[in-house]
Amino acid sequence: MDFSLHSLNGIKTLELIDISSGSRVGYIADYVIDCINNRIKYLIIPVGKQGWFSKNDFIEIEWGKIVKIGSEVILVDLKNGALKRMDA
């Protein structure tokens, strides 16, 4: 098996690409971590414009939807409703 280690800060700098549509999803803003099992559950991705007076909307992408973490991008498969909207 081919394993490569990434830091959480390093992964935040990688762009997410949806392999089912080929579209850009965005960059990771935060993580939801399961402290009992020591695993990342969701990636938190901001959507829309971010500003001082704008409402910040986010989507959550399940960790299991990640297909591959490369050196420049993270490939995710979002074709089966993997997105969950949340408000800040």
Image (tube, rainbow, N blue to C red):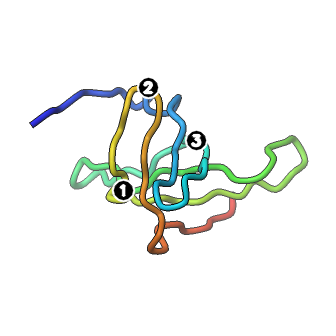
Cβ atoms under marks 3 and 2 closer than 8 Å: no
Which SS class for mark 1? strand
**Left or right of residue 81: residue 68:** left
Q: In the displayed image of the protein, which residue is found farthest to the left?
A: 1
Find disc 2 in the rendering and name its residue.
Answer: 10
Q: Which residue is drawn at 54% across and 37% down?
A: 15
Say which of 75 and 32 sits in front: 75
- Tell me how many marks there are: 3
Which-is-in-front pick, marks 1 and 2? 2
CA gap between label 3 and label 1 equals 14 Å
**Rendered position, 21 above or below 74:** below
Q: What residue type is labelled 3?
A: Ala
Q: Quadrant of the N terminus?
A: top left
**Amino acid type for the residue under numbered disc 2:** Gly
Quickly name the residue at label 1.
Answer: 41
Marks 3/1 in contact by CB < 8 Å: the verdict is no
Asked whether the beta carbons under mark 1 and mark 2 sit within 8 Å of each other, the answer is no
Real-space Cα distance between discs 1 and 2? Answer: 18 Å
In what element is the residue under mark 3? Answer: loop
Residue 78 horizontal/vertical position (percent): 47, 63
Left or right? Give the position of 21 relative to 1.
Answer: right
Residue that numbered label 3 is attached to: 29
Going by the image, does 13 lie left or right of 71?
Answer: right
Label drawn at residue 23: none
In the image, residue 58 above or below residue 53:
below
Residue at position x 47%, y 35% in the image: 73
Q: Earlier in the sequence, mark 3 or mark 1?
A: 3
Secondary structure of residue under mark 2? helix
Residue 84 coordinates in the image, percent (x, y)? 55, 68
Q: Alpha-carbon neighbours of circle 1 within 10 Å: few (<14), some, or many (≥20)?
A: some
